[in-house]
Amino acid sequence: MKTLDVAVLGIFVADLAFRAPRLPVMGETILGRGFAMGPGGKGSNQVIAAARAGGRAAIVTRVGADAFGDIARRAWAADGVDTGAVITDAEAPTGAAFIFVSTETGNNAIIVESGAAAKLSPADVAAAEATIAAAKVFVTQFEQPLETAMAGLATARRHGAVTVLNPAPALPVDDAIYALCDYVTPNETEAATLTGIAVETVADAERAATEIVRRGARNALITLGEKGALLHGADGTVHVPALKVEKVVDTTGAGDAFNAGFCVAIAEGRTPAEAVRFGCALAGLSVQKPGTAPSMPTRAEIERALAG
């Protein structure tokens, strides 16, 4: 019997977030309007969001034997994340991310250095097989090596898990990876990179989703920011509106919140369309708070948003 709802293969980085009206140009120094440091990395954000959303969640990753690695372990422990498949690397530092957040719009720009997690390998996936086998849903991204993501998807598929690929940051990939995916979940920019189809409207998203399915994925699920998300696959196409948000504070991590919510809902047996709505609720709640992992909502907050 499966003992985990979601297993996440991905990276942890310490987020170093700076708030300012704009980015400086080369050679320029400008004054910021806020700074925060906290847990980040797509994999870590997703596993924390899944745990807060009520899922039994585990992470497969590498961290360094340093202060940032300690931050990671404390963050996971606070939300009850299973860390049995976390490797401590004595030779490489824990990753870090520079995050610029616009004080004018809440939008962000990010530079990620994966650190120890850049060494995540298919051998690490094999060592974590018991954790992956215990999960109902498996999700990974492209912040660790591509061959490692493929090994994780193949292992999860072999053990009967629902497989989810969040292709971020977007990379040109061989179509072979799509055959391992029950759901591929890019945002508009990532979908355009994967397919060559510019995504500006819901209709554009459907064309891009059709192309991803043609390449071998069972379903394509494209997130569209304030326009919600579009799910396309063998069972048809559905567009789910975004949660209504009064004020966007920080969009960093919204995609991670969506993916985590979607995975938890699928693990709980909800229909794909219901799971998309659950994911949209997480994303909408997360953008109303600053930060990445710290902005992830609790199950009670999600239920209130869905009821409203």
Image (spheres, helix red, strand yellow):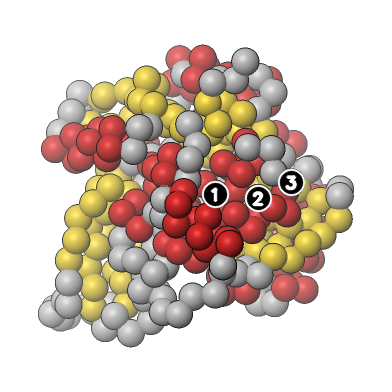
Q: CA distance from mark 1 to mark 2?
A: 7 Å
Q: Is residue 306 above or below residue 85?
A: below
Foreground residue among 232 and 274: 274
SS at badge 3:
loop
Work out whether residue 248 or residue 191 is closer to the camera in this orientation and state it.
248
Amino acid identity at mark 3: Thr
SS for callout 1:
helix
Q: Which mark is residue 261?
A: 1
For label 2, the residue is: 275
Residue 206 vs 13, above or below: the answer is below
Contact check, label 1 and label 2, Cβ < 8 Å? yes
Q: Secondary structure at mark 2?
A: helix
Q: Is residue 259 left or right of residue 41?
A: right
Q: Which residue is mark 3?
A: 271
Q: CA distance from mark 3 to mark 1?
A: 13 Å
Q: Is residue 269 left or right of residue 112?
A: right
In the picture, which quadrant includes the C terminus?
Answer: bottom right
Q: If the image is split into quadrants, where does the N terminus sit?
A: top right
Disc 1 marks a residue whose amino acid type is Gly
Left or right: 145 with respect to 23? right
Q: Is residue 237 above or below residue 264?
A: below
Kindly indicate the quadrant of the structure image that contains residue 34. Answer: bottom left
Q: Are marks 2 and 3 in contact (CB under 8 Å)?
A: yes
Q: Looking at the image, which is closer to me, 22 or 277?
A: 277
Q: Earlier in the sequence, mark 3 or mark 1?
A: 1
